[in-house]
Structures are given as C-alpha cells and as structure tokens.
Amino acid sequence: MKILVVNGPNLNLLGSRERDIYGGQTLADVQEKLQELADTLGCQLFFFQSNHEGELLDEIHSRRTMVDGILINPGAFTHYSYALRDGIAAVNLPCVEIHISNVHARESFRRESVLAPVCLGQISGFGLHSYLLGLRALVTSISETSYS
Ligand code: DQA
C-alpha cells in the first residue's frame, strides 16, 4: 500500500513555530516516526510539504495514480481552501485530515474545515501522535474496503 503524506503551509517550521501549541519536534522527526510506523504496517510513504496551494494540488494530482490514499495536515488551508477541497474530491482517493493541535479548542475560525466533508475523517489534538493515529486509521480503512 502506498500513502502520500501532505503537509501544508508553515508546517516546515515545526520545532520552532509556536512550540507551546505545536511542540518541539520538527517535520523531519514526524516523518521519521511515520516511516517507522509505515515499516511495521508494510506500507510505502511519499512525503511532501509546501507553503503554496498550487504546489500541493500539483503533487496530489501527479501522485493520484501511484498511491492508495492521502494523509494530510492542510495547515491553515483547512479552513478556507476550496481548491484543495476540490482537488481531494477530484482524485477520488481515501483521505484522512489530521491536526497537531485541537482545532476545536482554539480560535473560532479553526473550527471549520472545508476539507473534512471530502475526507474519511479528521484527527485533531493529539500532537504528533495525530499523524500516527491518522496513518493507522487510513491504512485500516483502505484495507477494509475495496479501495486497495
Ligand atoms: C494545524 C491547525 C491549523 O489551524 C493551523 O493553521 C496550522 C496547523 C495543526 O496541525 O494543528 O497550521 O493544522
């Protein structure tokens, strides 16, 4: 099974960005932990991060026939990117949305996700474990359906 792991804007600054909210681990640390889990689950990961909406879309489009699902932390695009929402719907791949922080316990604008309706589900608030829980949820869902 092949999974595209997408990180949106400002997530390249994990480890130094608002550490009280996002913690001290870097994106490289996240990717290392995900890779360890992927090895035990027997799946292959492709990592991509960009601060640019169009680049995120280009990556999702170009990988669409190569992967079985998408794990995405869309960053602030979660709350307003109809383009990303449509892109996920367009490729018709199972997708899990994750957030490090609990977006429902923060500013009111973070409570809405325009992507959530086109995702299998959303995991939010478990720090870096959100990525690991998201990968497990995605792999389990794909295994249990006819997607794989
Ligand atoms: C985030 C939450 C978003 O609201 C925010 O814009 C981010 C990170 C999270 O992982 O908690 O950039 O997606």
Image (spheres, rainbow, N blue to C red):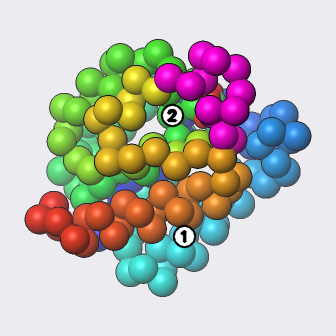
> Mark 1 packing: few (<14 Cα in 10 Å), some, or many (20+)?
some
The answer to whether the residue labelled 1 contacts the one labelled 2, judged by CB atoms less than 8 Å apart, is no
Q: State the residue position of label 2.
A: 74
Residue 124 position within the rendered picture, expressed as x and y whole percent measured from the top left: 58, 45
**Left or right, 106 with reference to 138:** right
In the depicted structure, whether residue 44 falls above or below residue 121: below
- The residue lying toward the viewer, choosing from 123 and 75, is 123
Instruction: Determine if the C-beta at disc 2 is less than 8 A from ligand 1.
Output: yes
What residue sits 17% from the left and 65% below the top?
145
What residue sits 64% from the left and 18% below the top?
108
Residue 136 position within the rendered picture, expressed as x and y whole percent measured from the top left: 45, 68
Q: Is residue 144 visible?
A: yes
In the depicted structure, whether residue 46 falls above or below residue 124: below
Instruction: Name which quarter of the figure residue 76 lies in.
Output: top right
**How far is disc 1 from disc 2 in space, using C-alphas?**
19 Å
Image quadrant occupied by the C terminus: bottom left
Q: State the residue position of label 1.
A: 35
Kind of element beneath mark 2: loop
- The residue lying toward the viewer, choosing from 77 and 141, is 141
- Which range is magenta? 100-112
Instruction: Name which quarter of the figure residue 82 lies in.
Output: top left
Sooner in the amino-acid sequence: mark 1 or mark 2:
1
In the depicted structure, whether residue 140 falls above or below residue 73: below
